[in-house]
Amino acid sequence: QKRYDECLSLLICVERGTTHHDFLETAFPSDYFKVGSSMEEVREMLLNGTCNVIGQEKSGIERDALLIDGIRDGNIRLGNKLMSKEPHGIITRNTDREFSDIINWVV
């Protein structure tokens, strides 16, 4: 499959076994992404040029940005394009009815 324009050099690194990996498998041809066994490996893959994008949830990207020196020196930047929505849930103990009620009212 031929690549065009902005996707010409796109290589996305993602952690194996995550929902982000599952999404990439359905949204991109396999030659668009590389898979690491941990987020530490994925960060290293970004820094060593194996890829030029990390696929992860927004909170993880923001946390990882603090760990990557390239952010501070301007060689790496954070984007703002969201490709999917990661659902979250809240679990409460059934022994704390008042707290459970508050959570249900808020959520």
Image: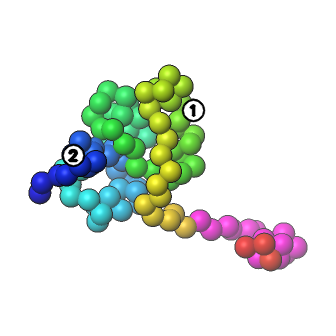
Q: Please indicate whether residue 9 sits to the left or right of residue 24 in the image.
A: left
Name the mark nearer the viewer: 2 or 1. 2
Disc 1 secondary structure class:
loop
Q: Which mark is residue 66?
A: 1
| Residue 77 in picture, x, y percent from top left | 47, 36
Type of amino acid under label 1: Leu
Residue under pointer 2: 8
User: Looking at this rendering, what residue extends furthest in the front direction?
Assistant: 5
- Find the magenta span and give its range: 88-104
Disc 2 secondary structure class:
loop
**Residue under the image location 50 percent in, 51 percent down:** 80
Q: Is residue 82 above or below residue 44?
A: below
Type of amino acid under label 2: Leu
**Residue under the image location 47 percent in, 58 percent down:** 82
Mark-to-mark CA distance, 2 and 1: 28 Å
| Residue 61 in picture, x, y percent from top left | 51, 44
Q: Which mark is residue 14?
A: none
| Residue 31 in picture, x, y percent from top left | 19, 50
Q: How many marks?
A: 2
**Residue under the image location 57 percent in, 32 percent down:** 66
Q: Residues within 10 Å of mark 1 (few under 14, many from 20)?
A: few
Decide which of 21, 38 is in the foreground and name it: 21
Decide which of 35, 12 is in the foreground and name it: 12
Which one is earlier in the sequence, the residue at label 2 or at label 1? 2
Q: Give the position of the N terminus as an image quadrant.
A: bottom left
